[in-house]
Image (cartoon, grey):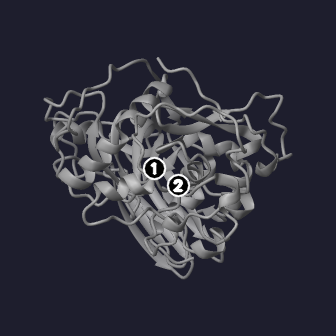
C-alpha cells in the first residue's frame, strides 16, 4: 500500500490500543523551551498532520496569558478549564520495551548489536517501536468534562486554527489530548513498499541495510551534541510523545464550510475511499437527511422518537469524504462522519480514542465497514448540547461477536443525557 511511512506505522500500531502512535514524537523546534520540555500533553488541542505529526495549537488548562505554553494565542472568548485529577503510571512501558505489530516477522540480530533486526519477509507491512528507557503514561480521569467543553467550543477552535493560525485543518482533524505515553528515547522502524527507520533524540542511531536486513545501533546522545557526557549531567525530560489518547471532533459540513474561506477539504482516512463509502440513492431512508444544515451549535437537543437514528448501515456514504485528500488512517474519522450522517439534529460529532477499541478486537485493524457495522452492538448515540457521541450499552445488551444490525435499532435508542 502506497503512502507515507507514518500511515504504515499508524495502521500497524493502532491495534495495540495504546492510542494514536505519533510517527514524530519529538516537540517542534519552533516552540518555546517550556513547551518543548514538557512535550505534547493532556489538554493540548491540535491536529494530526498527514505525516503523523501532532501540530499543537493551544492548551485548554492553561490561561491565555501564559504565552510560554499558549504561544500561538487562544480562540476568541477562551476560558481555561480547571485542571482535575490525572492518573499516572511512571513505568507503563518497562526499561527497555519494544512494541511490534502482528505482521512483524523480524528476528533479533546477532549478539553485540544493541538494537537490530533481520527481516524475514517484507511481503506485508509491519512496524516496530523501541523504548530504551521505557515510557510513562498519564490520563485525565474525568474525560466527560473535556468532551462537554469540546462540544461547546468546537466551532471557535476550528475557526481559530484555520483562521488565526492558518493551518487549513480539514474537518474531522481536530484532536483534544486526554492522555499520552511519553519517553526520553525511542526508535521506529516500518516495513511497507519502502522501509523506513527513525531514532529519537535520546539516541543517535546508525543504520545499514543489506538485502532485507535493517540493523540499528544506538549510541548515547547528549544535549551539547558532544560524544562525552557533560560534567553535570541532567536527566533528560520525558517529552517524547509516543502515543496520544483523546477526542477527535467533526462539525457539520455546512457549519464548517461557513467558517472557511477558502474552503478546506475534509479529512479522509483511507486510500480506496470509493470502495469503502458506497454511493446509494436510497441512503436517506435511514438518516432523515444528510450532513447539511446550519442550526445553532448550542441548540437544545431534540427528543427521541421517530425512526431509528442509525438505520441503514449498508447504505451510508459520506460525500465529503470522497476527496483526494488522504490523511493518516484513524477509525474515529469514520465514526464521527457516521454519527453526523445518522443524527441530523447534532451539529458536532465527538468520539474518544478508546471508543473504537472494542470495535476492532483483533490483532490487526478492522476495516471501516466492520467498525461502523459493530457500533450498534456496543454503543448508542447520545446527544448533549448540540453534539453527538457514543454512549456504552449496558453489558447485557452487548453480546460478543453477535452484532445487532443497525437497521434493527429501536426507534427510542437515541439518548439525551441531562445537562448541568
Residue 409, position in %: x, y?
78, 43
Question: Viewer-nearest of labels 2 and 1?
Answer: 1
Residue 351 seen by the camera: yes
Mark 2: give few (<14), some (14-19) or many (20+) Cα within 10 Å.
many
Q: Residue furthest front?
A: 306
- Label 2: state its secondary structure: helix
The answer to which of 148 and 176 lies nearer the viewer is 148
Mark 1: give few (<14), some (14-19) or many (20+) Cα within 10 Å.
many
The residue that appears at 48% across and 68% down in the rendered structure is 215
Residue 43, position in %: x, y?
35, 33
Which label number is shown at residue 365? none
Q: To which residue does mark 1 refer? A: 250
How many labels sit on residues?
Answer: 2
Residue 74, position in %: x, y?
20, 38
Which label number is shown at residue 333? 2
In the image: residue 148, left or right of residue 192? left
Q: Are marks 2 and 1 in contact (CB under 8 Å)?
A: yes
The answer to which of 258 and 195 lies nearer the viewer is 258
Indicate whether 241 appears above or below 338.
Answer: above
In the image: residue 272, left or right of residue 86? right
Amino acid at each position: 500500500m502506497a503512502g507515507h511511512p507514518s500511515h504504515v506505522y499508524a495502521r500497524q500500531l493502532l491495534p495495540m490500543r495504546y492510542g494514536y502512535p505519533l510517527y514524530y514524537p519529538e516537540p517542534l523546534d519552533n516552540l518555546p523551551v517550556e513547551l518543548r520540555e514538557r512535550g505534547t500533553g493532556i489538554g493540548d488541542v491540535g491536529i494530526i498532520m498527514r505525516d503523523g505529526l501532532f501540530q499543537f495549537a493551544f492548551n485548554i488548562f492553561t490561561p491565555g496569558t501564559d504565552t510560554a505554553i499558549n504561544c500561538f494565542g487562544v480562540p476568541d472568548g477562551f476560558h481555561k478549564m480547571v485542571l482535575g485529577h490525572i492518573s499516572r503510571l511512571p513505568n507503563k512501558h518497562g526499561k527497555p520495551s519494544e512494541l511490534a505489530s502482528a505482521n512483524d516477522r523480524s528476528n533479533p540480530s546477532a549478539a553485540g548489536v544493541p538494537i537490530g533486526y533481520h527481516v524475514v519477509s517484507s511481503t506485508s507491512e509491519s512496524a516496530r517501536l523501541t523504548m530504551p528507557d521505557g515510557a510513562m503514561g498519564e490520563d485525565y480521569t474525568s474525560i466527560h468534562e473535556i468532551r462537554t467543553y469540546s462540544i461547546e467550543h468546537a466551532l471557535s477552535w476550528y475557526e481559530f486554527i484555520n483562521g488565526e493560525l492558518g493551518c487549513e485543518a480539514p474537518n474531522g482533524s481536530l484532536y483534544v489530548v486526554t492522555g499520552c505515553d511519553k519517553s526520553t528515547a525511542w526508535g521506529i522502524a516500518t516495513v511497507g513498499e519502502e522501509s523506513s527507520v527513525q531514532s529519537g533524540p535520546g539516541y543517535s542511531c546508525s543504520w545499514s541495510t543489506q538485502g532485507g536486513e535493517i540493523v540499528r545501533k544506538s549510541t548515547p546522545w547528549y544535549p551539547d551534541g558532544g560524544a562525552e557526557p557533560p560534567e553535570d549531567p541532567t536527566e533528560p525530560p520525558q517529552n517524547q510523545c509516543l502515543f496520544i489518547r483523546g477526542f477527535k471532533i467533526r462539525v457539520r459540513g455546512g457549519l464548517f464550510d461557513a467558517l472557511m474561506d477558502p474552503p478546506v477539504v475534509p479529512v479522509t482516512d483511507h486510500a480506496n475511499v470509493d470502495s469503502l463509502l458506497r454511493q446509494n440513492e436510497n441512503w436517506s431512508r435511514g438518516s432523515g437527511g444528510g450532513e447539511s444544515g446550519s442550526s445553532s451549535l448550542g441548540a437544545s437537543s431534540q427528543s427521541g422518537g421517530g425512526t431509528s437514528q442509525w438505520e441503514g448501515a449498508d447504505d451510508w456514504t459520506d460525500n465529503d469524504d470522497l476527496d483526494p485528500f488522504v490523511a493518516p488512517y484513524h477509525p474515529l474519522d469514520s465514526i464521527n462522519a457516521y454519527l453526523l450522517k445518522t443524527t441530523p439534529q447534532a451539529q458536532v460529532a465527538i468520539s474518544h480514542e478508546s471508543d473504537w477499541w472494542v470495535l476492532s478486537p483483533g490483532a490487526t485493524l478492522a476495516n471501516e465497514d466492520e467498525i461502523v457495522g459493530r457500533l450498534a452492538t456496543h454503543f448508542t448515540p447520545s446527544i448533549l448540547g448540540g453534539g453527538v457521541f457514543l454512549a456504552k450499552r449496558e453489558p447485557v445488551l452487548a453480546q460478543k461477536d453477535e452484532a445487532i444490525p443497525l437497521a434493527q435499532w429501536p426507534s427510542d435508542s437515541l439518548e439525551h443525557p441531562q445537562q448541568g
